Amino acid sequence: MSARLTPNDVGKPVENAAGERVAVVTSVDRDIAYVRPATDSLESITSSIGWDGIVEQSIGLHSDAVREVTTETIRLEGELPSTDDTVTPALDSGGGGSPDEA
């Protein structure tokens, strides 16, 4: 299932299929949300998914990985993609553009 992502989703927490908060949306461009690991989850997830040393980077999360978008959170079908997938520089602002526009 694919959910529609919009710039209104910037700042929302991202939960994995188990309901654990694993990231936060930093920007949205078309059907890709760029996310960074949530600060309360850093120690528990960064090493387990290979994100050691790249916490300040965002990864692209395609809408087809999203099960549901609510007013408060984004829920994934499974887990966050690994760093082998799209990795982009982190954005400082919550704009709706792609990281290339930062």
Image: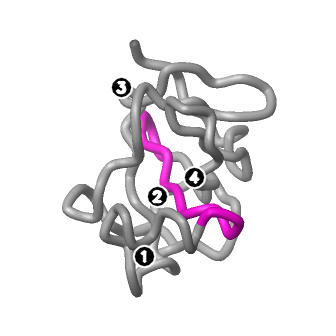
SS of the residue under disc 1: strand
> N-terminal of the two: label 4 or label 3?
4
Q: Position of residue 96 (x, y in %)?
A: 61, 51
Q: Amino acid at mark 1?
A: Pro
- Answer whether labels 4 and 1 touch (C-beta < 8 Å): no
Q: CA distance from mark 4 to mark 1?
A: 18 Å
Q: Is residue 35 magenta?
A: yes
Residue visible at 42% across and 18% down in the picture: 2
Pointer 3 with pointer 1, Cβ within 8 A? no
Q: In the rendered structure, which disc, 4 or 1, sits on the residue that comes first in sequence?
A: 4
Write the residue at 49% across / 45% down: 33
33 lies above or below 71: below
Can you say whether 33 is above or below 56 in the image? above
Residue 68: x percent and y percent?
58, 20
Please name which of the two marks, 4 or 3, marks the residue nearer to the observer. 4
Label disc, if present, on residue 89 of the rendered structure: 1
Residue receiving disc 2:
98
